[in-house]
Image (tube, rainbow, N blue to C red):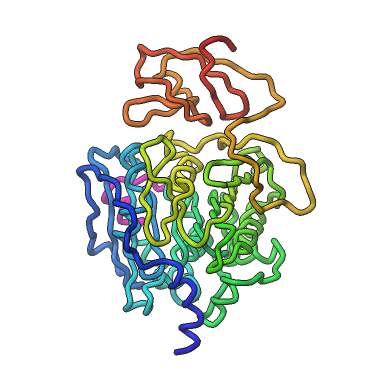
Amino acid sequence: MASLAAALLTLAASALTLTPSGAPPARAASTLNQVTGFGSNPGNLAMYSYVPQNLAQGAPLVVALHGCTQTANDYYSHSGWPQFADQWGFTVVFPQTSSTNNSLSCFSWFDSTKDTRGNGEAASIAQMVSYAESHYGSDSHRVYVTGLSAGAGMTADLLADYPDVFAGGAIDSGLPAQCATTQSAASSCQTSSQNLTPAQWGDKVRNSDPGYSGPWPKVAIWQGSADYTVYPVNATELRDQWTNAWGISQTASSTQNLSGGTTESVYNDSSGKPAVEMYSISGMGHGLAVDPGSGTAQCGSTGAYFLSYICSTYYTATFWGLNSGAPPTSTPSTTPTTPTTTPTTTPTSTPPTTSTSSSAPAQCFTASNYAQTVAGRAYQSGGYTYADGSNQNMGLWNVAVTHTLKETSPGYYVIADSGC
């Protein structure tokens, strides 16, 4: 039908014919496996899982949703999630829809019979989470969901539908929860402002699971400034929606410039911890930001709508605390911003920087790499230790190597062996 084509055309064009322009990264011995019999599956989805070898009981779980015309294997191969699952020890579930559900294999973020609590695809994904908790020993308190494009739209819906299930989410080139409830309304959500107040956006979250009063999921929002499939206004609306759900200001608590022309804006909760983070990538079109390479903060491989700017997966995972086994007290962004009536959401042309500033006195801590990690000032990956915030390599993760770490701002540590 013409209305269906109009509603889905841009998301389909966005994502998602995957002829890779870069080879997928080498994978560990674990592989992507299909799981059957995970539940009644009212949404007619397929479940695939990636479980690292020797995964500990009680490890976190990430659910990763592909975009239109993609498959679970495409997202597995390009997004970088398996890489960090290996390094930090967590399971990734990759749900997959098909042309049987939607002619373009889009998750139905715009269909209230499929994207609401207890119904259709949303219910199938919730069953996948239950399966992972019972069969892989996943920690029910550390379940996260992320997605691209139509998968991002479904991610936002799931966060609103099941705030009791998901501790956090990441919406990559996506749309606000319950922006559209019919196919005919989808195109308007993708390309134009809906002219709703933050409270009206927040109500869409609150009304998705009536009676739920928190805690709310931590939400990361990723958006390209040159996205003409899901327009950048959606990131602003997502920020308004989730800051309102949290009951916090729409003015950023702090900002910083990252690599790839990325501006990170952080919105803290009442205790000063990041609740919502928005990443705006200058010049990026529609897609998932990746950064192929072997660096600590690099990941993924390029392909159609897997775009080489910054490893969004790394920053999302650290925002959720997957690198340390527990939610971090802060993100690398600690540069205060001057409150304004209207927050700036457009990336600046300032060159990327990793500098930080703080009015609080610096504190120093001298201990072994093992002790620094246990204390939450560093994390280990691949047998090496890295300082929280700065990600500086501190050497082997053991009790024989000792460093002094200076906390230059809350949760941000640098090596200060020469003196504090």
> Which residue is nearer to you in this view: 163 or 224?
224
Which is the main secondary structure of the residues drawn in magenta?
helix
Residue 203 appears at what percent x and percent y?
Answer: 64, 65
x, y percentage for residue 11?
47, 71
Q: Is residue 158 above or below residue 85?
A: below
Q: Is residue 259 above or below residue 49?
A: above
- Residue located farthest toward the bottom when viewing the structure as drawn: 1
Q: Quadrant of the C terminus?
A: top right
The magenta region covers 128-140
Instruction: Say which residue appears at 47% left-offset and 64% top-offset.
Output: 149
**Residue at the extreme right of the image, as rendered:** 341
| Res. 294 image quadrant | top left
Q: Is residue 72 left or right of residue 203?
A: left
Residue at the image position 57 percent from the left and 33 percent from the top: 354
Q: Give 393 or 72, whichever is nearer the viewer.
A: 393
> Percent from the top left, x then y, of residue 55?
27, 39
Q: Is residue 129 magenta?
A: yes
Count the marks: how many? 0
Identified at 37% across, 79% down, the residue is: 103
| Residue 257 quadrant | top right
Q: Quadrant of residue 332?
A: top right
